[in-house]
Amino acid sequence: MPQENFFEYLTYSDDDLKWQIVCTDIGSTEIKPYESYPPQKERHPRTFKQVSTGRTLKEYQIIYITKGSGTFESKGKSYQVTPGTILFLFPGVQHSYRPDFKVGWNEYWVGCIGKFPDDLVMNGVISPDRPVFHIGLHDTILSTYQELFERVRLQRPGFQLRLGASIMMLIADILGYSRQSVQHNHTGKFIEKAKFIFAENLRGNIEIEGISDKLGISASHLTNIFKSYTGMTPYQYYLHMKINKAKELLETGELSIKEIAYELSFESQYYFSRLFKKKTGYPPSQWAVFDNQV
């Protein structure tokens, strides 16, 4: 059961912000059937208490519904909320949500600001266009919220740094469970077969259409499941495997950069060097030296 109507609005320093994420507020609420929402409005800041009618925040919030049902609205779309639903709220994006009056719900929430979540949005990892995740009920997610509550109650020195780290882990777990939830039982077999074909052809080139034909699925379907499973398109993953092989060859010192580019069928030494630096942060000429210094 949630800690009934527990919430805190937190302070943070400029030094805390250097961590690139700080916790701004946190809480949990049990809304019983026929109970008004949100409860105890007088104890919340004006903007926060408008949650059921429509509000715009200056922060991110991550809300986990573990019991009951309701609705969530954002950017002109309406979503059904059921147990195991995660709601992501974004700064400057108007939204509203409320439990069904006859049902109620249990919610856990945490707010944050900082460069870390900003970068996630900028890089498309999270987006106001995808604010809802139906991940199901997971003890690890609930445990993270409980850990956050405990740190807030104690507020020991450096607690904001630890809160930030826990929120990062919370986001990582949510995205991980979200990927799992869209997988079918046979998806892993397709992915593993594709990876095997990639590994067999590291010294050549591949065509996604040819791979999908061997697997008996369309190229678009292969791309979709591969991206949801690994976070990369099949070709991006294939290039990643080639770069890892190039690292191995560079570390042996037996082949020149030009020979490695030819060995792995890159179109030119220049393209190989440019791609290698983009993926690793180092040009091929420095990789072996860097590796030996680690």
Image (cartoon, grey):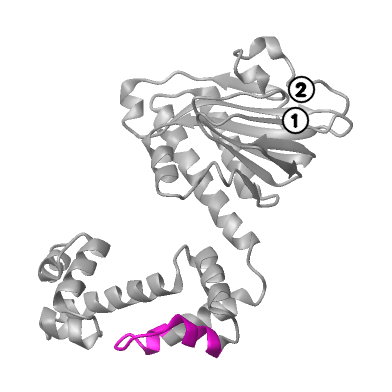
Residue depicted at 47% across the width and 33% down the height: 163
Residue depicted at 53% across the width and 66% down the height: 229
Q: Residue 189, position in %: x, y?
A: 58, 80
How far apart are labels 2 and 1 at the CA level?
A: 7 Å
* Numbered range of the magenta stretch: 198-214
Q: Residue 132, position in %: x, y?
A: 63, 45
- Mark 1 = which residue? 98
Q: Amino acid at mark 1?
A: Arg
State which quadrant residue 12 falls in. Answer: top left
The quadrant of the rendering that contains the C terminus is bottom left
| Residue 176, above or below 41 | below
Give the camera-side residue of 155 and 64.
64
| Magenta segment includes 203 | yes
The quadrant of the rendering that contains the N terminus is top right
State which quadrant residue 266 falls in. Answer: bottom left
Give the camera-side residue of 252 and 97.
97
Q: Which mark is residue 78?
A: none
- Describe residue 36's horizontal placement relative to residue 171 as left or right: right
